[in-house]
Amino acid sequence: MNGLDLLGFITVCVLATFATRVLPFVALARQSEHPLVVHLGRYLPPAVMMILVIYALRDFRPLADGHLNAAADGWPMMLASLVVAGLHLWQRNALLSIIGGTGAYMAMVQVGWVP
Amino acid sequence: MLKHHAWQDACVTTLPVMFGYLPLGAAFGILATEVDIPAWGAILMSLIIYAGAGQFLAVALLAGGAGLIEVAVATVMLNSRHLFYGLSLLRRFEGAGWRKPYLIFALTDETYSLLTTHLGEAGLSHAQAFRVSLLNQLWWVLGTTAGVLASTALSFDSRGIEFALTALFIVLTLEQARRLRQWLPFAIALGTGFGAMLLLPDRHLLLGAIGAASLVLLADYRRRHHRGVA
């Protein structure tokens, strides 16, 4: 692929990506005070956040196919998530929770420990 | 707030994203190099496309020789969850002036999460939201550059560091719950999240769950509106 083709390809990706991000701002520019938009602005972010957590942990499916079937990093992932949540409920320090949980996960994965 | 303090604060806010974006950006750089995308191409993609999963998809499509229309459709499909992100930020970004186009351009999952959950006391100002967005992209571009330059072994064993993004989402969910003190959006998310996991293939999971959650919230809005308590 020559440089010009690559630029064309990248341009299409740029336009398609930006289109999905800008569309609501353009289409609903005059609707920002509408009670429905206010309602979604209030309740959608927490729902999205919860969905992103479920999505990030989706490889852990202990009961899939009727038997124990967690991905190799499934258990470390769940345990490290508990560390994050526990630290955060205890100290409420975002950075501490994230570094603590990530450190625990890295240790488990690098040592190759699986319960 | 002094300017350098503002940047310092933004740096701290984006630290967990940095832990995720540097290795993921590097992974993208390495992958792009493997399918013979030149260094400038990979870095340009992180500068002007700036979409995590979207860029990995682009590399796969490029390697598979996909046509431009196919590329456009697949990219829009993958990123269409951003439609709902924008919907919930219409008010937040109002009056952001010259920063607004960049705030919209740089709206990744992680940046959206940081901007909609205010860690610390007050909500982020537009200027601060801009700094946070810019730093997040900086981490992504730096990671890509590192991946392109040093696609050989890194001396630091960083396996597992990408868990920082999962940890970030967990922390932000807890913060949202603490502020909102209502179970409804979380119950909806659990329902649509697990529903999508059971019913949809992996690549449609996020869009399916977020789209369905938006529809349920819409139904909830209509129900309240009918009762006159919206």
Image: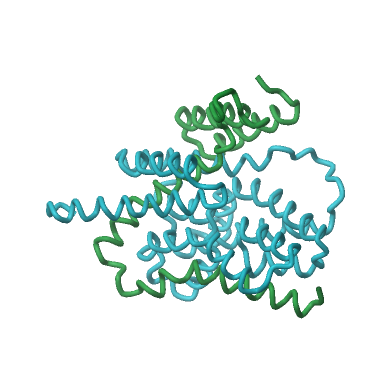
Residue at the far right in the pictured view: B152
Q: Which chain is cyan?
A: B
In which quadrant of the rendered image does the C terminus of chain A lie?
A: top right
| Vertical relation: B196 (above or below) B94 | above
Left or right placement of residue A5 versus residue A98 in this view: right
Q: Quick one: B78 or A37, which is closer to the camera?
A: B78
Residue B114 visible to an observer of this rendering:
no
Residue at the far front in the pictured view: A65
Seen at 37% across and 40% down, the residue is B186
Seen at 34% across and 44% down, the residue is B185
Q: Quick one: B81 or B136, which is closer to the camera?
A: B81
Residue at the far top in the pictured view: A115
Which image quadrant is residue A109 in?
Answer: top right
Provide residue B77's location: percent of width, then percent of height: 53, 62
Q: Which chain is green?
A: A
Question: Could you tell me how many numbered marks the image carries?
Answer: 0
Which image quadrant is residue A100 in?
Answer: top right
In which quadrant of the rendered image does the N terminus of chain A lie?
A: bottom right
Provide residue B144's location: percent of width, then percent of height: 73, 58
Residue B213 visible to an observer of this rendering:
yes
